[in-house]
Image (cartoon, helix red, strand yellow):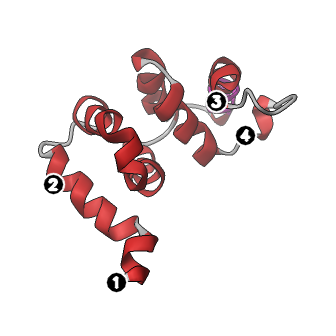
């Protein structure tokens, strides 16, 4: 188990790298104030492969998977290719299409309540 200081330092460093791409519309973003969920989402959407792999050094695969399912999978029409890449290459999900369909059904509130 890594010391909490190392994890905190790694999160801040990662936030500094991703901030110009993910938070460009905000005047100044204090990297230490970015929530874990927002950081994970920003790196998954805007980060390159090494940055995405760095997430696994800081957070558990389960936490990353949960944020991915809840925030990115429901945007599937916009993030179709990215979702498949994250599922297969980062999270090593054996059947990405099926898993994405199931997560979409589970977390897409619009479809669940409009039916």
Residue 63 located within the stretch drawn in magenta: no
Taking 103 as reference, is 45 above or below it?
above
Which residue is pictured at 82% across the width and 31% down the height?
A: 29
Q: Position of residue 24 (x, y in %)?
A: 73, 26
Q: Is residue 54 above or below residue 63?
A: above
Identify the residue shown where x is 31% and y is 31%: 90
The circle drawn on residue 34 is: 4
Mark 1 and mark 4 lie on one chain; the one further toward the N terminus is 4
- Residue that sits furthest to the right in the current view: 27
Residue name at image x 71 percent, y 31 percent: 23
What SS does tag 1 mark?
A: loop
* Badge nearest the viewer, 2 or 4: 2
Say few, some or many: other residues with alpha carbon within 10 Å of mark 2 (under 14 / 14 to 19 / 20 or more). few
Determine the image quadrant of residue 105.
Answer: bottom left
Q: Which residue is mark 1?
A: 115
Q: Would you name the residue on which mark 3 appears?
A: 22
Q: Position of residue 9 (x, y in %)?
A: 69, 25
Residue on which the image places disc 2: 98
Would residue 89 appear left or right of 40 to someone viewing this image? left
**The magenta segment:** 5-12
Q: Looking at the image, is mark 1 or mark 2 earlier in the sequence?
A: 2
> Residues under labels 2 and 4: Cα distance?
32 Å
Give yes or no for contact between labels 3 and 4 (Cβ–Cβ under 8 Å): no
Query: For the residues carrying marks 1 and 3, which lies nearer the camera in this image?
Result: 1
Q: Are marks 2 and 4 in contact (CB under 8 Å)?
A: no
69 lies left or right of 7? left
Q: Which is more N-terminal, label 3 or label 1? A: 3
Which numbered mark, 1 or 2, is in the foreground of this view? 1
Distance (Cα) linking label 1 and label 4:
35 Å
Residue 62 is at least partly visible in this image: no
């Amino acid at each position: 188990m890594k010391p909490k200081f190392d994890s905190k330092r790694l999160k801040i460093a990662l936030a500094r790298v991703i901030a110009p791409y993910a938070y460009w519309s905000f005047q100044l973003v204090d990297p230490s104030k970015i929530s874990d969920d927002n950081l994970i989402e920003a790196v998954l959407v805007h980060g390159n492969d090494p940055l995405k792999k760095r997430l696994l050094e800081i957070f558990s695969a389960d936490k990353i998977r949960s944020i991915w399912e809840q925030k990115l999978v429901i945007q599937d029409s916009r993030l179709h290719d990215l979702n498949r890449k994250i599922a297969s290459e980062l999270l090593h999900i054996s059947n990405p299409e099926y898993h994405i369909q199931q997560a979409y059904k589970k977390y897409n509130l619009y479809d669940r309540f409009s039916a």
